[in-house]
Image: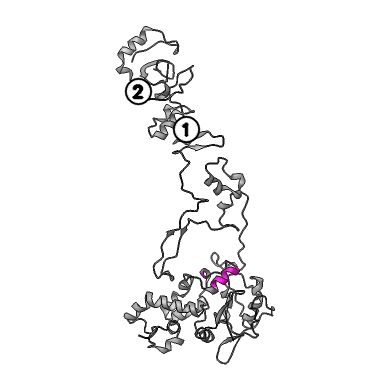
Amino acid sequence: MAEPDYLNYILNNPGLRESAEAMGYTQQEMIDMGDWHWNTYGQAEFAEGGRLNTPFETQLPAERTAPMPPAEAAAFEASVRRGDPSEMWAARAAIDPAWNVGQFSGQGWNVDPDNPYATGILGDTIGVDTGVGQIWSEGDPRFLQDRYVDAAIANDFPVGWVGEEGTWKGPDELAGYWSDVTNAIRNEAGDLRAIRDRPSTGWANTEILDVGPRWAGNVRPGVGVGNVYGTGGYTQPAPLDWSAIRPEVSYTPQFEALTGNLMSNWQPWATGQATPGGLVDYQIPGVQTSVGTSPNVTYSGGNPNLFNTDTSGFSGNVTTDTSGNKWVMTPGGQWIPAGSDYGTALAAGNAADPSRYDQSGAFMGSEGSSYDKAGWEMNAQGVYTGGHVTDLSKVTIPGTEQFTGEKVGWGFTPAADRFAEQAAARAGPHPEAGTSFYGP
């Protein structure tokens, strides 16, 4: 079998030809495109009778100058926007991030074959003039890529770069090149030609000429609401000082990283915000040109400066303040000492009814009860109920210092089950309670 001719495979299929021209491919980039497309889609399309011009045979030579089929024309803009940036589009984005392949416009695209471009591709003379984000052809100093029809030449640039009078409002280094675009003419063969030679140093910062006759008075329409369109360029705002609303509590070093720098990390729309890793990478529905499959949502991994999931140094749900005190938050949103009765019970997963703890997290028993030194339960009015506990470290004893030793298992005996203890209690006074004892 003959060697595949991927260059003519692209040029002999109108949809592939226009996509390659929109990407501004060099010869090697077009070869790579042809190789990828044939082995991903082309072979199957040929087997089904839908693509007759292959890298090995051209059955329909007229396709080289034919317009795109309606289905490919309808998907043209979206297809180009999904493409991996070529050397030309990478140069454009380096000049200004707004000039990226994702904002490519198919409106007013010149669907006629660009013969000087095809000649340069076949002769391997096409290069990228990085200073202006355009391609040029070695040995042809008046080459201009014929991208848009005259009425849409502003569509090759982001919204707002061309003013109402055809004045250039984009990056200064492109002003001279815009002069050549508006003053370009067509020769007898219909090929677009510049009226002056491209300098050996490139098109950037060339002399600015008056707006030429190719300018038809149309600017690229902006995106607005209803019939209102913005024609000015978008200026990204600077970060604001949000330190006044920064949380005072410093939870972890990772939290510090997230809230530092005047909280500028919370303002991704502002200038100077590098895109952190570990974000969801969303791609629009359709076929992803680079891999030939439907896009999906992927996760690229956490940024250790902002989204560190390392739990070393953490103790359960406990946090430490700047003084070294440990705290835990109750289900009701109250911070209590981590070593309190309630904090310990929460950490162990066996906390009782929240109403049985006071504001410091000390256990009070049911319905606000407290206990005397012997562990006998008193209600909120100081009346003995007959209840009893065996571990005094778990209860509140009025007028005494709370037990601070090692806490052990404890039990609670309802009054109805402790008749013997009740009888003993009745035999003596209970000065701690300050009242008489009542049976159950």
Which residue does the image show at 59% across and 52% down from the upper left?
A: 264
Q: Which residues are magenta?
A: 89-101
Quick check: 94 left or right of 366? right
Judged from the image, the secondary structure of the residue bearing numbered disc 2 is loop
Amino acid identity at mark 1: Ala
Q: Which mark is residue 40?
A: none
Q: Residues within 10 Å of mark 1 (few under 14, many from 20)?
A: many
Residue 96: x %, y % from top left: 60, 67
List the residue tagged with mark 2. Answer: 411
Whether residue 72 is visible to the viewer of this picture, yes or no, is yes
- Which residue is the extreme one toward the bottom? 188
Residue 292: x %, y % from top left: 40, 70
Which residue does the image show at 39% across and 7% down from the upper left?
A: 428
Judged from the image, the secondary structure of the residue bearing numbered disc 1 is loop
Amino acid identity at mark 2: Gly
Q: Which mark is residue 338?
A: 1
Residue 186 inside the magenta-drawn segment: no
* Quarter that holds the N terminus: bottom left
> Which of pointers 2 and 1 lies earlier in the amino acid sequence?
1
Give the quarter of the image for residue 388: top left
Q: Tell me: residue 83, above or below residue 246.
A: below
Quick check: 22 left or right of 346? right
How many numbered circles are shown? Answer: 2
